[in-house]
Image (tube, grey):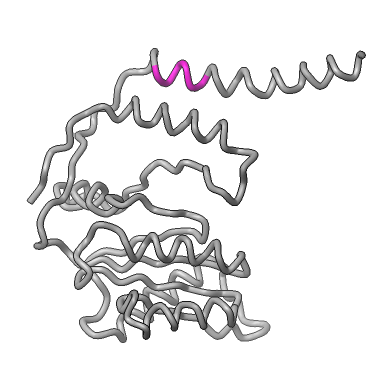
Amino acid sequence: SSSAWVFIAVEVSVAVPTFLHLFMTMFIMNPRKRPKLRLVGEDVPRVDVFITCCREETELVLDTTRAACEVDYPQDKLRVIVLDDGKDSDLRDECYHLKFSGVYPNLHYVAREKIPGKPHHFKAGNLNHGFEWVNNLPGGAAHFAAALDADMIPEKNWLRAIMPHMLIDERMALACPPQVHSSHHNTNKTMYANGFQALLQCSERRPALPIA
C-alpha cells in the first residue's frame, strides 16, 4: 500500500544520513592526530567525580554511581559525589547504604537547599555547589574534577585515558571524551549505538602510550 511505501521512505531518509556519516568518518576523514595515552601506576593526582541528577530513575543514577566508583583508579585518590537536585530519598538511602556498608567508602551524597524565589541555576548551580562542598572534606577539593550526567556510565579506564592529556599540557583546562548512547534503558537506540561504537573502535586503532 502507499502508506507502507511512505513509511519505508521515511525510514530510509533517516538511516541514510547516519550511515553516510559513519562511512565518511571511517574511510575518508584523516585519522586523529592526538596520541592515545594511559596513566599508569598509583602515583596519580586526586580526582573528584561529580554525578549531577534531578529526579531521574533511581536505578539509572545508581548504575552510573557504581560504575564511577569502580573505575580503574586508586581508591584513595578518587571520590564520587552524587549531586541530587531532586532530593530523592530512595537515592539518598541507597547511596548511604553503599557508603556506610563499606562497599564504596569514597562515595558521598549531597542535596543542596534550594530557596524559593532565589535563582539556583539548575545543573550549573548544582555543580558549583558541589565544587564548594568538597572543600569541607578531609584534604579539601581534589586536584581535578570530573563530571558525569545521571545516565553516563564511564568505561573502566576512563580516568586513566583522560588524565594524561590534562597533565602533559599545562594549557589544558578541559577534556571531553566521546559518548556512546547505548544502554538497556533505551533499546531503540541499540542498532545505531552499536554502529557508532564499532566506528569509535576503528578510529582508535592506535597503541596506548603509558604515562607514569
x, y percent for residue 146: 34, 61
Q: Which residues are magenta?
A: 21-26
Q: Who is closer to the viewer here, 119 or 59?
A: 59
Q: Is residue 42 rendered to the left or right of residue 189?
A: left
From the image, which quarter does the N terminus lie in? Answer: top right
x, y percent for residue 176: 36, 47
Q: Quadrant of residue 56?
A: bottom right
Position of 191 relative to 161 (above/below)? above
Residue 161 falls within the magenta-colored stretch: no
x, y percent for residue 88: 59, 78
Q: Quadrant of residue 178?
A: top left
x, y percent for residue 16: 62, 17
Q: Residue at x 48, y 61 (%)?
A: 63
Q: Residue at x 35, y 50 (%)?
A: 155
Q: Residue at x 81, y 22 (%)?
A: 7
Look at the magenta stretch and give its main secondary structure. Answer: helix
Q: Is residue 51 rendered to the left or right of residue 183?
A: left
Q: Who is closer to the viewer here, 13 or 42?
A: 42
Position of 157 relative to 116 (above/below)? above
Disc count in the image?
A: 0
Position of 105 relative to 5 (above/below)? below
Q: Is residue 47 rendered to the left or right of residue 41?
A: right
